Image: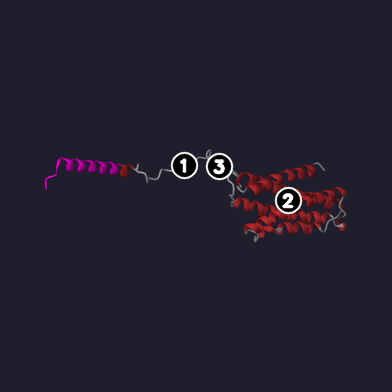
Amino acid sequence: MIPTPRRRSTMTARLAVGAVCLGLLVSGCGSNASPTAPEISGDMAPAPGSQTGLRTVADVDYEQFTLSADTQLIKLAKLAQEPARDASTKVKDTAKEISKIAGPDAKELRMRLIESGDALTDHHGSGTKDAQQLQELTTQTGTTFDKNWKVAVLAANQEIIDAATTELNRGEDQETRALARKRIESASKLKSQLSGS
């Protein structure tokens, strides 16, 4: 059968459309082609804490470590209140302030870790070094106790400041970052107070 001019024109049009579609598929310009995702440079990466609802390992690490440090501070504060330690009035007053700060902070951190399922960890209690430090302090009294107690408190307090600073640099959870920011403020105040005594 010899194609009529009309049929020949229709076939030519179909072939032209097919060629165009084939060209689009080969070149990747079709409607279903996936665009290449742009690489995110350091300047374009989202700032820590800017993404709502995100919680990372850094946030959990901060909560676990700070809970451990808070636990040590609470024990040191209780130890300073023992009559047998014969601590100075200034040390006892500082111990009361520590309890007011570390107590609520430890409670909130513990609750957050329980809620997130990260409560079962060795970091939640004092380590061997902390236990030895407390044991040594229980054998001391008076000015000797005051001096070494202050050293122990400053060490634990500095660890909290360092951990909180790391959280602000790497953490993502907004509530945890708020706790870290608040803790830096209170810990820095305690540091200045003890360093000036």
Point out residue 194 in the picture as x, y percentages from the top left corner: 79, 45
Q: Nearer the viewer, mark 3 or mark 2?
A: 3
Q: CA distance from mark 3 to mark 2?
A: 32 Å
Q: CA distance from mark 3 to mark 1?
A: 13 Å
Q: Could you say which is closer to the camera, residue 1 or residue 162?
A: 1
Q: Would you identify the image quadrant in which residue 110 lies? A: bottom right
Q: CA distance from mark 2 to mark 1?
A: 42 Å
Point out residue 7 in the picture as x, y percentages from the top left corner: 18, 43
Q: Could you say which is closer to the camera, residue 15 or residue 68?
A: 15
Element carrying mark 2: helix
Q: Which residue is identified by label 1?
A: 39
Q: Could you say which is closer to the camera, residue 121 or residue 16?
A: 16
Point out residue 180 in the picture as x, y percentages from the top left corner: 68, 47
Residue at 62% from the left image edge and 57% from the top image edge = 116
Q: Could you say which is closer to the camera, residue 77 or residue 111?
A: 111
Mark 2 closeness class: few <14, some 14–19, many ≥20 residues within 10 Å = many
Above or below, comparing residue 130 to residue 35 in the picture: below
Do callouts 3 and 2 mark residues in contact (Cβ within 8 Å)? no
Residue at 76% from the left image edge and 53% from the top image edge = 103
Tell me which secondary structure the magenta stretch mostly adopts: helix
Amino acid type at image mark 1: Glu
The stretch in magenta equals 1-23
The mark nearer the N terminus, 2 or 1, is 1
Q: How is the image coloured?
A: secondary structure
Q: Which residue is identified by label 2?
A: 156
Relative placement, left or right, of 86 versus 55 is right
Q: Which residue is identified by label 3?
A: 46
The mark nearer the N terminus, 3 or 1, is 1
Relative placement, left or right, of 89 versus 106 is right
Mark 1 closeness class: few <14, some 14–19, many ≥20 residues within 10 Å = few
Element carrying mark 3: loop
